[in-house]
Amino acid sequence: MRTQVAIIGAGPSGLLLGQLLANSGISNIVLERATRDHVLGRVRAGVLEQGTIDLLDEADAAQRLRGKGLRHEGISLAFGNRLHRIDIADLTGGKGVMVYGQTELTRDLVDKRELAGLTTVYEALNVEPHGFGGEAPSVAYEKDGVTHHIHCDFIAGCDGFHGISRKSVPEAAIKTYERAYPFGWLGILAEVPPAHHELIYASHPKGFALCSMRSTHRSRYYVQCPIDDKVEDWSDDRFWDELRGRLPPEAAAHVVTGPSFEKSIAPLRSFVAEPMRFGRLFLVGDAAHIVPPTGAKGLNLAASDVRYLYWGLREVYQEKSEAGIDAYSEKALSRVWKAVRFSWWMTSLLHRFPDAGDFGRRIQEAELDYLVHSRAASASLAENYVGLPY
Ligand code: APR
Ligand code: PHB
């Protein structure tokens, strides 16, 4: 088999890249380890920057999002028993974000890919990128017990943090940076109207909480929890009590409870691998970097990598220039590190750290107070929240 770009992984990175390339006449095959149902069932964050929406538009995959996404022009920080609104639109010259679940976005991209008749191999096992240091890379995989080889010009490693692409690179050629946080997020989805019309990020002596949503009748809530808690430890009742206990009365009073239909605990981590290009292999999205979900940058960073790589590959095929792919790693990493910083900062500001001590907590309180009373500080938060320029 031969294709121009072999894409490993059918997460948002792989699917979006595949769609953009195909629309520009660049052939690609997506190899995915999991089943189609698994890919479509994953629940993740749900806040899109304008730049991400623009790219989805360019991929002609933003129709449903435009109809169903919720535009938000502010967020609230909750601390000291009250809500403090950050007027994002006012602080950024009219910008906002779109609340639209990654699950829905993945569905849109899968539908689009299938409608266009593009090849996705699900349950592709033992995927292995080969020869990316030279001129003739290939990707081997097994399907139904048979080994196949895809010969290609380039390999896009869109296979997430646990994927094979980053692991295929010689250790000496890659440098990684990592920070693990000493807590997790317990998240639930419930078919109940959201407590508030915008997102609430709450800092409370009992820990962080987040009120988010998927629609006007579906809510997504999170509470900070000990890293080794098990989902079974958390009944719905316990979750709702904990959530309400961490919100100011004006928000807690509007929490509508109901049975959860998804409940999971996620660890929080910051991780960056440098560089993001190894000859004809490119790392994209979670394969190269992870951010904690505070600020919802994961998917948006994946989209910005895709944008840089797509531009670069288009230049290769349409203009016979390698300038774009040569600049890929540096450009992508420059944006990645700023989002890594922002996510780390929001996480540090809003969570309870076991070893922070009284001094650390008073510093957090002072920073929150400064943040909501200084236009310069609020503007910095808003500018990062809507997404830094490309
Ligand atoms: N072979 C083939 N596919 C693989 C392999 C492998 N060895 N390893 C992982 N995969 C697949 C996974 O099953 C998954 O479908 O690669 C895909 C990676 O998808 P994501 O983890 O969603 O990563 P990415 O597409 O970069 O999306 C980034 O999604 O993960 C969230 O929070 C993250 O919002 C961010 C965004
Ligand atoms: C979500 O809706 O899942 C969400 C929203 C904002 C975040 C993280 C997650 O910062």
Image (cartoon, rainbow, N blue to C red):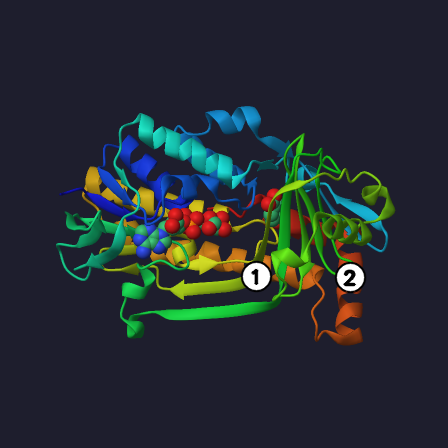
Nearest the viewer among 53 and 266 is 266
Q: Residues within 10 Å of mark 1 (few under 14, many from 20)?
A: many
Q: Is residue 165 above or below residue 218?
A: below
Q: Is residue 138 visible?
A: yes
Q: Position of residue 122 (x, y in %)?
A: 30, 43
Nearest the viewer among 190 and 272 is 190
The residue that disc 2 covers is 206
Nearest the viewer among 307 and 63 is 63
Residue beneath the point at 33% across and 69% down? 174
Q: Amino acid at mark 1?
A: Leu
Q: Amino acid at mark 2?
A: Lys
Q: Is residue 283 visible?
A: no
Residue beneath the point at 44% across and 39% down? 40
Secondary structure of the residue carrying numbered label 2: loop
Q: Is residue 241 above or below residue 99?
A: below
Q: Position of residue 166 (x, y in %)?
A: 33, 62
Residue beneath the point at 53% across and 59% down? 340
Q: Position of residue 216 (x, y in %)?
A: 67, 30
165 horizontally vs 209: left or right: left
Q: Distance of mark 1 from mark 2, alpha carbons?
A: 18 Å
| Quadrant hosting residue 356 | bottom right
Secondary structure of the residue carrying numbered label 1: strand
Q: Position of residue 239 (x, y in %)?
A: 72, 51
